Amino acid sequence: MPVYLDRHENLGGISPLEVATAHMRDLAIQDQYGVRFLTYWFDHDKQKSWCLVDAPSAEAAAKVHAEAHGMLPDRVILADPEIVHRYLGDDPVDEPPAWNPDGVNDTPLRTILFTDIVGSTDTANRLGDDVAMAMVRNHNEIVRSQLAAFGGREVKHTGDGIMASFDSVTRAIDCSIAIQMEMRRRNLDPKVQNVVVRIGLAAGEPISEDADLFGTAVNLAARICGAAEPGSVYVSNVVRELSIGKKYEFDDVAELTLKGFPDPIAVARVAMKGTGA
């Protein structure tokens, strides 16, 4: 398909997080129009942004913007990588970072997922390391298979769980639900070591270094995971707001006091219909 570069000017004081949120909303509905947003750039000082999009037509890309958030581009050009570079070079003051064909990974907003195996230390103490390791292997197999299915990236293994990153809030929630459902299905097998996990999600702009992610969003996701009930999925309020209008339902959870956060944090539990949660 053709590649288009669209340009948004005079955004009126919008913040980087608001631009990232708009991009996430584009990603959430792009499949309906056969469109794939590859990356975007944002110049906060000049209040301009650029989107690089693989689309059947400029009109299709604009329809995604219109439905997702209403911010229509001021200019759209048909481009290939060389033309993109040449076009940006005409305006060196406004030039965004170099175009990256794998630019979806440049999206600053990430949804961070943490899993935690409930009672793993107690299991090891009571039943031995072999049983505890069987539990961990079962957990790893389920979580990694669902990450692959929903486009998540495993960042690291935490010993009792896995930390992963998504560029889509909806895929992160879908993956979390799928993990819990598969855990429950697998636990019905008497030959398999049962595993119960808690899952926490938060969204933000983490810092990437040495193939790892750091920052407030990562810390928040970990704390939310630690506070979640066994067998549940808890999400930050940002994750909940970014999924407004989607198929999900949430049960309100009282604001939680989490270690390292001075103010109470509002979280919600994903209502998993037909799963008993």
Image (cartoon, grey):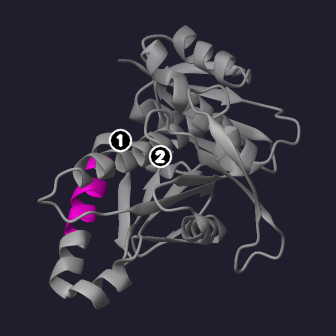
**What secondary structure predominates along the stretch shown in magenta?**
helix
Q: Quick one: 246 or 214, which is closer to the camera?
A: 246
Say if 54 sits above or below 137 in the image: above
Say if 55 sits above or below 252 in the image: above
Location of mark 1 (residue): 150
Q: Residues within 10 Å of mark 2 (few under 14, many from 20)?
A: many
Tell whether label 2 touches label 1 (CB within 8 Å): yes
Q: Residues within 10 Å of mark 1 (few under 14, many from 20)?
A: some
Q: Is residue 273 left or right of residue 14?
A: left
Give the quadrant of residue 136: bottom left
Give the quadrant of residue 74: top right
Q: Estimate the x, y position of residue 73 in percent, counting from the top left.
A: 69, 22
Q: Magenta residues, as a range?
A: 137-147
Q: Estimate the x, y position of residue 150 in percent, counting from the top left.
A: 35, 41
Q: Is residue 85 magenta?
A: no
Q: Which mark is residue 168?
A: none
Q: Quick one: 98 or 36, which is closer to the camera?
A: 36
Say if 116 sits above or below 123 in the image: above
- Say which residue appears at 52% left-offset and 52% top-offset: 233
Q: Residue type at mark 2: give it.
A: Ala
Q: Secondary structure at mark 2?
A: helix
Choose the circle earlier in sequence order: 1 or 2.
1
Q: Estimate the x, y position of residue 69 in percent, counting from the top left.
A: 71, 25
In the rendered image, is residue 151 in sight?
no
Q: Which mark is residue 172?
A: 2
- Say which residue appears at 57% left-offset and 63% top-offset: 228
Q: Quick one: 22 or 162, which is closer to the camera?
A: 162
- Say which residue appears at 45% left-offset and 56% top-offset: 231
In the rendered image, is residue 156 in sight?
yes
Q: Residue type at mark 1: give it.
A: Phe
